[in-house]
Image: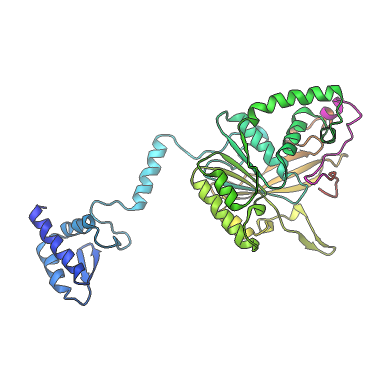
């Protein structure tokens, strides 16, 4: 296209706009629409110039919204669908596939990673916070560069650390809670504290208050693995449904920025003949409090279902970490054992003598119960 032809096309297009007409691009050129003598502009554009030249000048002038019919691209432009395919192929050629955070064998394949929202849900006292923190420490153990961000609106971080010390040392939770430790137990706790210190140095703890705006400010300019516990407590406003919707949209925004998000969710009570209660065996995705927006935005959802005691001691329970949703692949559930006194989830084949570690440190504490978030003892009824 010569400069003279380009100048003539520009004059017709600009003249049509100045006269109050609108321009609509088509495969055969640009149509001038309106009541101000549109044919004075359309005819010369269609009769005197090749359509590709008219469309090229229309695109380059940017004198009107560049809206085109579906499936039609202006000269020099590539449809977004093609750009998306090109980007995908480039990632595949570089070997850049989807990423999950590395973890131990007990929870291999757990769907949590950068750009994803993963939800774990269970009734109170079922160990969902314990499982989430065990997973965070596991990821820190397997990835020496990642930083974890813990936003827990229900349980203080020192309590969470106490549980991790129990899990690693074998010293009963009650002995740690009341600082009633034998010398041998204290040595075990000191050893566990030294073991986790490098991991703790890569954990950022949200100080509170715990609102949506506070979360947004705290995460600004950062990126890593975010543990949100539990998500309903961060929802703004008086309307729970609207608040959770706003929170989930913010979490999706964080995921789009590269965050990996593990969100712990509360569940609703079921109703039976004896009234309302929690029955983990009946948990579904609809059991999540304000479930609609959570189901829509989450990439994966796991439900912690109790499956009875391992043996005579009802404090060691079989658990089904049931995958109710996986947007990106197969739904893989995990059969686990929750050793409540040891504050530890593990694979069933790992359980040989569930309390051997606890009893090793003295019979004076070997029968102590584990404690839930509010300080009450775990019992079969509370599980």
- Residue 355 in percent (x, y) is at 84, 31
Q: Is residue 265 above or below residue 165?
A: below
Number of numbered callouts drawn: 0
Q: Main secondary structure of the magenta part?
A: loop
- Residue 52 in percent (x, y) is at 18, 57
* Farthest residue, direction right: 364
Q: Is residue 156 magenta?
A: no
Q: Quadrant of residue 139?
A: top right
Q: Quadrant of residue 65?
A: bottom left
- Residue 82 in percent (x, y) is at 34, 50
Q: How is the image coloured?
A: rainbow
* Farthest residue, direction bottom: 35
Q: Is residue 108 above or below residue 26?
A: above
Using residue 78 as the reference point, say whether residue 52 is left or right of it. Answer: left
- Residue 4 in percent (x, y) is at 8, 55
Using residue 255 as the reference point, say whether residue 228 is left or right of it. Answer: right
Which residue: 65% across, 56% down? 285
Q: Is residue 362 magenta?
A: yes
Q: In which quarter of the image is residue 100?
A: top right
Which range of residues does the magenta coloring cover?
357-375
Using residue 183 as the reference point, say whether residue 109 is left or right of it. Answer: left
């Amino acid at each position: 296209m010569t400069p003279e032809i380009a100048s003539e096309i520009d004059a017709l297009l600009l003249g049509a706009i100045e006269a109050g007409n609108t321009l609509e691009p088509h495969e055969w050129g640009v149509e001038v629409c309106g009541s101000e003598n549109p044919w004075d502009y359309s005819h010369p554009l269609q009769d005197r110039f090749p359509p590709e030249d008219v469309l090229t000048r229309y695109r380059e002038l940017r004198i009107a919204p560049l809206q085109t019919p579906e499936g039609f691209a202006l000269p020099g432009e590539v449809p977004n669908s093609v750009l998306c395919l090109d980007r995908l192929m480039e990632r595949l050629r570089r070997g850049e596939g989807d990423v999950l955070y590395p973890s131990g064998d007990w929870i291999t394949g757990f769907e949590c990673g950068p750009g994803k929202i993963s939800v774990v849900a269970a009734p109170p006292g079922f160990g969902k916070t314990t499982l989430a923190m065990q997973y965070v420490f596991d990821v820190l153990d397997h990835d020496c560069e990642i930083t974890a961000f813990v936003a827990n609106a229900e349980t203080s971080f020192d309590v969470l650390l106490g549980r991790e010390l129990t899990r690693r040392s074998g010293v009963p939770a009650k002995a740690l809670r009341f600082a009633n430790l034998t010398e041998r137990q204290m040595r075990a706790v000191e050893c566990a504290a030294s073991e986790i210190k490098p991991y703790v140095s890569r954990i950022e703890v949200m100080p509170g208050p715990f609102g949506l705006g506070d979360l947004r400010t705290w995460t600004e300019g950062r990126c890593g693995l975010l543990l949100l516990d539990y998500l309903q407590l961060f929802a703004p406003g008086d309307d729970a449904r609207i608040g959770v919707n706003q929170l989930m949209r913010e979490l999706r925004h964080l995921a789009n920025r590269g965050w990996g998000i593990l969100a712990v969710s509360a569940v609703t009570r079921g109703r039976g003949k004896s009234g309302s209660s929690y029955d983990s065996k009946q948990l579904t995705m609809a059991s999540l409090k304000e479930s609609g927006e959570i189901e829509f935005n989450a990439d994966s959802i796991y439900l912690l279902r109790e499956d009875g005691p391992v043996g005579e001691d009802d404090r060691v329970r079989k658990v089904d970490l049931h995958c109710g949703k996986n947007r990106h692949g197969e739904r893989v559930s995990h059969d686990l054992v929750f050793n409540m006194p040891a504050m530890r989830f593990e694979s069933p084949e790992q359980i040989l003598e569930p309390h051997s570690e606890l009893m090793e440190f003295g019979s004076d504490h070997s029968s102590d119960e584990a404690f839930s978030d509010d300080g009450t003892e775990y019992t079969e009824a509370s599980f």
